[in-house]
Image (cartoon, rainbow, N blue to C red):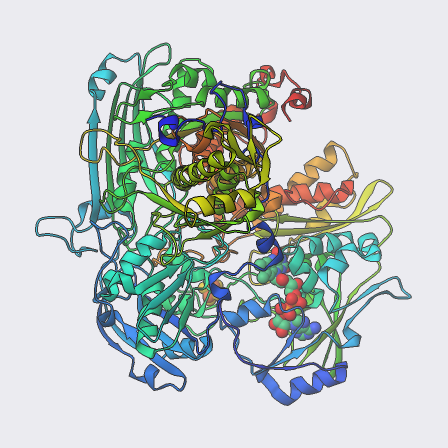
Amino acid sequence: MSARDLHGPGAPWGEREPGHRSNDAFSVIGRPLRKVDGLAKATGAALYADDLVLPGMLHAKTLRSPHAHARVLRVDASAALALRGVHAVITGADLPIKYGVIPWTPDENALAVDRVRFIGDPVAAVAAIDEDTANAALKLIRVEYEPLHAYMDPRESLVRTEPAIHPGKPGENGNISKHVRLDFGDVDAAAAAADLVLEGDYTFHGTTHAPIEPHCALASWSADGLLTLWSATQITHYVHRALARVLELDPARIRVVQPCLGGAFGGKSDPFSLEFCVAKLAQKTGRPVKMLWTREEVFYAHRGRHPMQLHYRTSASRDGRISGVDAKILIDGGSYSSFGLVTTYYAGQLLTGPYDFPSYRFDSTRVFTNKPPCGPKRGHGSVQPRFAFEVQLDEIAEQLALDPIEIRRRNFQGEQTRTVNGQRITSNGFLQCLELVERASGWKDRRGKLPFGRGLGVAGSMYISGTNYPVYPNDMPQAGVQLKVDRSGAITVFTGGNDIGQGSNSVVAYLVAEELGVPVEHVRVVAADTDLCPVDLGAYSSRVTFMVGNATIDACRKLRAQIVGALAEHWQCEAGRVRLIEGRAIDTGDPARSLPIAQAFHIAEARCDTLGSTGSYNTPKLGGDYRGGTIGASPAYSFTAHVVEVEVDVETGRLTVPHVWIAHDCGRALNPMLVAGQMEGSAYMGLAEALMEDHDVNRYGLHAGPSLLDYRMPTAVDMPELHALIVESLDPEGPYGAKEAGEGPLHPVLPALSNAIHDAVGVRLRHLPFTMPRVLRELRAAGIDRRARERAKPARLATPPHAARGGAR
Amino acid sequence: MLRMPQFSLERPRSLAQAIALLSEHGPAALPIAGGTDLVPNLKHELHSPSVLVALEHVPELHGVRVLADGALSIGAMTRLADLALHPEVVARAPALAQAASLVAGPQLRTMGTLGGNVLLDTRCQWINQSYFWRQALGFCLKKDGTVCHVVEGGKKCVAAASNDTAPALMTLGATLELEGPDGVREIALDEFWVADGINNKKLGQGELLVRIRVPQQRAGHRGAYGKLRERGSIDFPMLGVAVRVDIADERIRDADLCVVALAARPLRVKRVGETLAGKPAQGPELETAIEAVAELAHKQCHPLPNIPGDADWRKEMVPVYVRRTLLAALTGSGPVHHV
Ligand SMILES: Cc1cc2nc3c(=O)[nH]c(=O)nc-3n(C[C@H](O)[C@H](O)[C@H](O)COP(=O)(O)OP(=O)(O)OC[C@H]3O[C@@H](n4cnc5c(N)ncnc54)[C@H](O)[C@@H]3O)c2cc1C
Ligand code: SF4
């Protein structure tokens, strides 16, 4: 199905010509417009979950486990309940039903039922007249624990079965969360026949999202027994389902609303303990109940990037063509499943582009440990393998004396093709990405030629624009949109899409404005409210622009057909002549005939009926024909290439990154400013993970520093110049050709940094994070100290840095 | 957000009133200056005062003056942001201005004061945490517990003095003017410290730091501050190095070097003056002497795993930052900081 089939004839986008931007045909699309909620956020007028206050509202707090692994023997809340101002205390017994975002692995309880699995696991919740009373009550709850052996090392979880963190079926190791092994082609034969086989170990540490807004939820029951939950979530629909399940309620009695959200990055894409707790406490007390987590609690709730130990063996021919990739990955999942089933697949499934390799095997195992649970963080599951593979690819280039960009070009998979694991690739602008970063960074004149201590590195990647795998199997659309037309000329769009700061509400408004010819200011977006909006599955897997965007266009086309039909009758002309553009309806055959858009709506409403429409999007059938073959199958893939420049201080181990060039194929930039923002934000996040961030526990299993002081994220002064270079490959199925831009551009920055370090000092860093102590250790192990600069070969000093830099900025 | 504990707030308008209030309430009262150290510690339940005595409106604690003898008299309530830019401070005590300019981040320097910085509580990764966290740990010697997690079996808290301005003030020979219920006293900053992480200073009960006196430096005074931290802003020092060098006739006459963020008190590296005295202010002979000082500091400094940051690596950073900060002082190019 092509975009034309999907959207019908007369779609207002240009012909597909590589490198040619056809945005001139658009009024709204392609323009760097302000976000629809930009002013509200900048002025502080936007209402976040914690801004909501209801009459009689109580405040809730969570009691958490001080043990990494223990049986809960007894919880005595009588003293807490007796405290003046305390309205209710709930424990695991009040919410015994397990849940999990993936329906096959429900292993979480809102509050511990019989066992706690990490320091910070929720045990009880209190609702009281204010936060201080609730906190005081927590200190009065007596819990009896029987401590169990705690697992901190994932390698131990692989081999030791007792005690099991999640006791499984008899004969199964309850410490193994998921194992996937998939074989495509014959990697062993490829290795035997290869000119070069490179094998190595790589490490990716844990990192977390740290959105600026902590999780917060507010629940209220109406007099007639309807539950409303406002929650800082990126998956309204799944929270709706999970609430019904755990509270044993008819979902028709539940409404879930996502207020303005202060960032998520994957950290709000599970149903969370606080959502069930406030709902239950509100039910018990008959009053609205709010819970706002502290920053520390956000670190415990985590769901961040999985630490992975990765082993890669890559086979290649003398001319640099990859013939096989063989991966073995151990994934530290922390204490619960979360999205872990998907993570385990993604760790293998998403590596099969932008390069073509005829044989591939991956063997990934996710284990449980007694640490805060891991989950999806921007670039879910694929950032870690990408790091390992792109560093290994650089090593291959080095051994074969090939330019690192050249080896990536040689292995380019092409467009309109199929990957070794059966994924369909449509548009693919990876070569343009490579070309742009090569040119912008001055690569040809500078790589390998900068003075000792300075270097350039490259890496590439691909990512999904949503997947065709809804987390629960169903045949309904993945995204739905509804439009309502007002006689004033304003249009209201109802969408289940979750705007988490990425700008999806803005994108919806731009599309409606473009399609129906109304000014953006006349489009109101009502989003992520289960009572008002058609279902969208949520803001994850970079699916919203692609899927909600297509659903929006679908709804607009239907509405437009009605309006255009009515005007054609009115003007007695062919419908093809009528255009809705920039606030007017025009007869293109007789431009003198034109009407303000509101009048056009009046004519249509008089002739048709109350104006409105619905639209939806569902993925075509995609994916390989094997178990798990649909996981990672996306209607379109984005592609990215980065060049990172680094300066290495060989005395301290400090890495300074002056520049990152980010080229990203987003299909079409519906708003180039938002796309560039996503690209820069992604590069920031990836670089932060490489240089500083480290989400870990200490020797007692306690979080090593659950605060924004101890969990080091770069500040503005720590950041390089980020150069966003947008590539538009115009995907045949994306909305106006758009693909994702929010996650893909994160991937290459980490391996590109490692590759740049190699260019700078000749040392390969394979184990993240590249903190100063680690870098210095590795430099020393390679015999590099402050006298190395003097010893450096004069050839490396050939080009003066400033002369070479000029053209690059 | 972590909640602030309940307390009542007193806002005295004179030094006498402030001292009277502190005497009246005894240990149940604590003074608060900018609050940038105290407030996080209150939220972490490291103190539970019932009264806070705000020093903001005590006029005696404000103002930077140059005294008749050329000394600087700096009110304890001087904000770090103002201190860092004060022309007299920049001219007369460059190391102090530089250290103040690198404390925390811009917002915190706008609130935080020099007095609060001198009196900053010691820091440790096992103590600057929430009550829940410390309880899960089983607490430690410094507060609510009986063991130390830094030194196994240790009976003494070794939480790190982490105040950037302290070593700079020590190299400048600063003295503190204190006033309490028993009157006024003056104490050399060198004498003020105790090697005990639980309380590393000799501040009497109910006593206030009124002013800090930085004596007139010799002609040819050079100073610099070097700060090691991961980020270019916000973070406490992982190592702070302050340097004073006195130059006369192109030669070093005297020198001093103090470090912070290693142990419970700021430390002076010994024999720096002797090693550098008489050396030319530039050239190979100076370089050799600087190497010798770096070596001295390396031998004398023993970072502990008290604050975040690999302790072995922090030890390796001592000679690097000593060398860089000495050079910066000599060339007038401080502070030494990576951004
Ligand atoms: C995120 C963060 C980062 C920081 N980074 C740094 C850093 O890099 N370097 C650094 O040195 N500090 C740092 N700090 C600590 C703090 O901001 C500074 O040390 C600041 O100078 C403290 O001054 P204040 O006025 O806010 O002190 P307060 O918090 O008001 O007081 C500190 C202590 O001194 C006592 N006190 C204050 N004034 C007087 C007085 N006149 N007489 C008697 N007692 C008094 C108070 O009772 C309290 O015990 C940081 C703090 C935070 C929150
Ligand atoms: S050094 Fe740290 S762990 Fe040891 S007693 Fe002091 S604060 Fe506690």
**x and y percent of residue A114 in the render?**
20, 67
Q: Nearer the viewer, residue A592 or A732?
A: A592
Q: Nearer the viewer, residue A194 or A259?
A: A259
For residue A329, which quarter of the picture?
top left
The quadrant the N terminus of chain A occupies is: top left
Name the quadrant where ligand 1 sits: bottom right
**Direction right: furthest residue:** B68
For the question of whether residue B235 can be seen, the reply is no
**Direction left: furthest residue:** A170
**x and y percent of residue B318 in the render?**
59, 46
User: What residue is shown at x 65% (from left), y 42% (from top)?
Assistant: B339
Question: Total of numbered circles in the picture?
Answer: 0
**Direction bottom: furthest residue:** B24
**Direction top: furthest residue:** A319
Position of residue A290 relative to residue A618, above or below, is below
User: What residue is shown at x 65% (from left), y 23% (from top)?
Assistant: A805
Position of residue B239 relative to residue B127, above or below, is above
Q: Nearer the viewer, residue A485 or A383?
A: A485
**x and y percent of residue B189 in the render?**
70, 66
**x and y percent of residue B156 in the render?**
48, 68
Is B64 positioned to the left or the right of B17 in the image?
Answer: right
The quadrant the C terminus of chain A occupies is: top right
For the question of whether residue A383 can be seen, the reply is yes
